[in-house]
Amino acid sequence: MIDKDLRPGERALVDDPAQAAGDASLVFIGRIRSPWQPGAPRPKNPTEARASGEASHLEIDPPFRPGLDGLERFSHVVVLAWLHRARRDPIVIHPPHADAPRGVFALRSPVRPNPIGLTVARILSVDHDRGIVTIDAIDFLDGTPLVDIKPYRPGIDAIPDAVVG
Amino acid sequence: MIDKDLRPGERALVDDPAQAAGDASLVFIGRIRSPWQPGAPRPKNPTEARASGEASHLEIDPPFRPGLDGLERFSHVVVLAWLHRARRDPIVIHPPHADAPRGVFALRSPVRPNPIGLTVARILSVDHDRGIVTIDAIDFLDGTPLVDIKPYRPGIDAIPDAVVG
């Protein structure tokens, strides 16, 4: 384990995924347009983002815009984004809210080997020509690259009685 | 648009993401061990997988195993996998169940520019030493590479009244 800027109990991977050749390549399909700028105050999670009352946009690049056909049939969308500012080498971290260090796969922190952020948002409108999906809220920074959009299907995605320890 | 093995109404990207240099690199953190082999019958979706009564496993590689610390506190897990057998260039496809072609971002098909599969499963057990998370069911093929695991949080992930068009 490498000890760089780690707090007690935290652990990092020996091989930083950010420096690795990698096993697969992503293409960015667009970016998030949100009110949240780096260094400024912003919501800590989707619930806070929603409480802000600030809508956001998913901006899809021209080649990928036909992929939006039919998305307007759904009320909610799953957004997968590449959290490009997050460290990828810590594997156990101690978040401020936790009583002890925890593994990154037991946290929703952006810090993880593959910093893919996942959030669910309500679709307000889909502009197919301009490639803009307007959503009710998101807690990701303005400019965050998008890697995928999926329709939310409550039959497989909603588990209201799931337990959080 | 390139016309290779496309049905009427289907469209493909000019630049196949599978051939592109890419904008970001993923590292595989392990793989799925499921009963489903390529070429054999398998469930079409998570609901069918669950109906099969067949448990599956998420096998995490040694360097990433500390990342599982604390996952046992949660009842359900979000699994992100790299659907390595899927074509990445179609952007509008006509699935057998649909009445017309649709954009891949309006479908849960594995076919999409970044073939990241998303599914939610119930955690049956977590073996930290061996890096094995046993889950109730998954519809992904045996051997599918894993890219991320997240705890499922119903407060942000469960939207039971979401509408499917």
Image (cartoon, coloured by chain):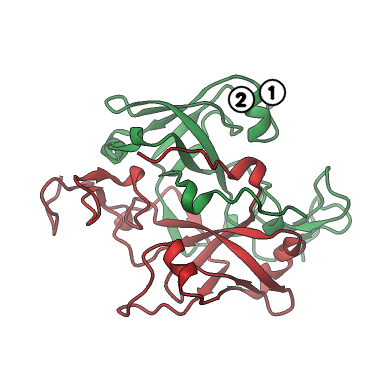
Chain colours: A red, B green
- Occupied quadrant, residue B97: top right
Please provide percent x and percent y for residue A73.
76, 60
Q: Compared to A4, does B139 lie above or below?
A: above
Residue B70 in view in this figure: yes
Q: Residues within 10 Å of mark 1 (few under 14, many from 20)?
A: few
Q: Residues within 10 Å of mark 2 (few under 14, many from 20)?
A: some
Q: Which residue is mark 1?
A: B40
Q: Nearer the viewer, residue B1 or B159?
A: B159
For residue B86, the mark is none
Please provide percent x and percent y for residue B69.
27, 37
- Give the left or right position of residue B165, taking residue B48 as reference: right
- In the rendered structure, which amino acid carries the disc numbered 1? Ala
Residue B38 in view in this figure: no
Residue at 55% from the left image edge and 41% from the top image edge: A159
- Give the left or right position of residue A149, taking residue A14 as reference: right
Could you tell me which secondary element the residue under label 2 belongs to? loop
Q: Chain of mark 2?
A: B
Q: Nearer the viewer, residue B140 or A105?
A: A105
- In the rendered structure, which amino acid carries the disc numbered 2? Trp
Real-space Cα distance between discs 2 and 1? 7 Å
Q: Which residue is mark 2?
A: B36
Q: Nearer the viewer, residue B44 or A52?
A: A52
Position of the N terminus of chain B, as image quadrant, is: bottom right
Assess whether mark 1 and mark 2 are in contact (beta carbons under 8 angstroms).
yes
Could you tell me which secondary element the residue under label 1 belongs to? loop
Q: Chain of mark 1?
A: B
Please provide percent x and percent y for residue A54.
51, 77
- Occupied quadrant, residue A41: bottom left
Please provide percent x and percent y for residue B3.
81, 59
Q: Compared to A118, does B149 lie above or below?
A: above
